[in-house]
Image: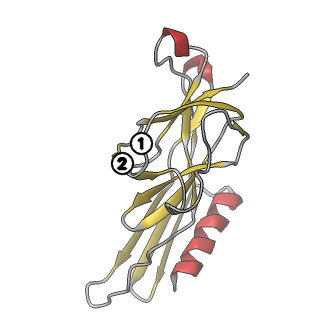
Amino acid sequence: MDLKDIQELIKFVAKSGATEVSLEIDNIKISIKSPTKKKRGEGGGADEDKATTIKQEPAQVMAAPSVSAAPVAAIAVSAPVADENSNYITIKASMIGTFYRSTSPETPPFVSVGDIIKEGDTLCVIEAMKLFNEIESEISGKVVKVLVDDSTPIEFDQALFLVDPS
């Protein structure tokens, strides 16, 4: 099973609506958990991040891939950052890693201040353990502020963008 097969499996599980899938092939164990909806007060729900675990027996070693384009949903939560920002939605990180605004230094950022975004648009890339995860928007609106510098480490649930939904 190579990286492409694993990526296709992750996409299939995400589209199928299954909540959890475990698979074992030739001493490789894969466990995929899809996001679940949870209510957070009156503000609506937010997706939890996808958890994908790949375990391998010590006798077998596979080369780690350098790039993965598996989309991962960002957590969007309505939270006032300050009084003047109370009508904005904060898009937060769904995982820890390194924040990148584009796929390489030569390419333009996915989004900039003033850009209009819609659901499913790629906002940034977060690198975690040599895998690059595209973070997609779950809301539509106008990007008001980018809260993180390019190529900086980020924490889970750290605010990344402010979006005006109006």
Residue 137's place in the image compared with 132, above or below, is above
Image x and y of residue 13, in percent: 63, 63
Residue located farthest toward the left when viewing the structure as drawn: 58
**Residue at numbered disc 2:** 152
Image x and y of residue 142, in percent: 68, 31
Q: Amino acid at mark 1?
A: Asp
Residue 61's place in the image compared with 42, above or below, is below
User: Going 70% across and 59% down the picture, which residue do you hit?
Assistant: 15
Circle 2 SS class: strand
Residue 78's place in the image compared with 68, above or below, is above
User: Going 32% across and 88% down the picture, which residue do you hit?
Assistant: 61
Q: Amino acid at mark 2?
A: Thr
Image x and y of residue 53, in percent: 41, 65
Circle 1 SS class: loop
User: Going 58% across and 60% down the picture, which residue do you hit?
Assistant: 107
Q: Say whether marks 1 and 2 touch (CB < 8 Å).
A: yes
Residue 104's label in the rendered image is none
* Residue 33 visible at all: no
* Residue 14 visible at all: yes
Residue 149's label in the rendered image is 1
